[in-house]
Image: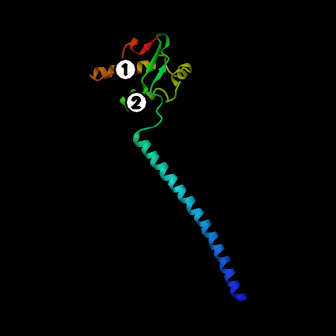
Amino acid sequence: MNGRGDYCKALSIRVNSATLGQIEENYGKYRMKSIIIVVCFVFAVFSAVVTAAGITEKGPAEITLDGGSKGTVDFPHQKHQNTLGDCKICHDIFPQKLGVIEALKEEGKLEKKQVMNNCRKCHRNLVKEGKKAGPTSCTKCHSK
């Protein structure tokens, strides 16, 4: 080939190399966008499944409460969640936080038997309505 043909051949290789670099760069950007979209989609699906299944942090299934001189109270927390459905029935009195009942009593923001009286009131109302209810006597809740 003559000098001009060699130059054109070399020029096309340079153009092709530049184009190849742009293609690789664009492919990298495209691939990153694709990965981000897939991750977002998987997260959205996972969140929807968790929400639909009702799997959220609702505290422990069982809570042991300090019942004073009568002994501890084993509180079936999950059973109450499933039965009542509305957390505010109890958590209007105290926030949803482990240890908060004792803390509020120490701060003077919760009366000594206020939680127990709320439980008994609810249980007694259910009994009056002829519905299945939790215990209403001391020894059924408190254990030494």
On the image, the x and y values in percent for residue 120 come to: 38, 18
Identify the residue at image location x=45%, y=17%: 73
- Residue 8, given in percent of the width and then of the height, sits at 68, 84
The percent coordinates of residue 95 (x first, y second) are 50, 29
Say few, some or many: other residues with alpha carbon within 10 Å of mark 1 (under 14 / 14 to 19 / 20 or more): few
Name the image quarter holding residue 118.
top left
**Total numbered labels placed on residues in the image:** 2
Of mark 1 and mark 2, the one earlier in the sequence is 2
Residue 7, picture quadrant: bottom right
Element assignment for label 1: helix
Q: Looking at the image, which is closer to me, 99 or 16? A: 16
Q: Which residue is mark 1?
A: 121
Q: Residues within 10 Å of mark 2 (few under 14, many from 20)?
A: some
Q: Which residue is mark 2?
A: 81
Q: Residue at x 62, y 70 (%)?
A: 22
Left or right: residue 61 versus residue 8 is left
Query: Is 83 rendered above or below residue 68?
Result: below
Q: Between marks 1 and 2, how big is the CA–CA gap?
A: 17 Å
Q: Nearer the viewer, residue 60 or 120?
A: 60
Position of 98 relative to 50 (above/below): above
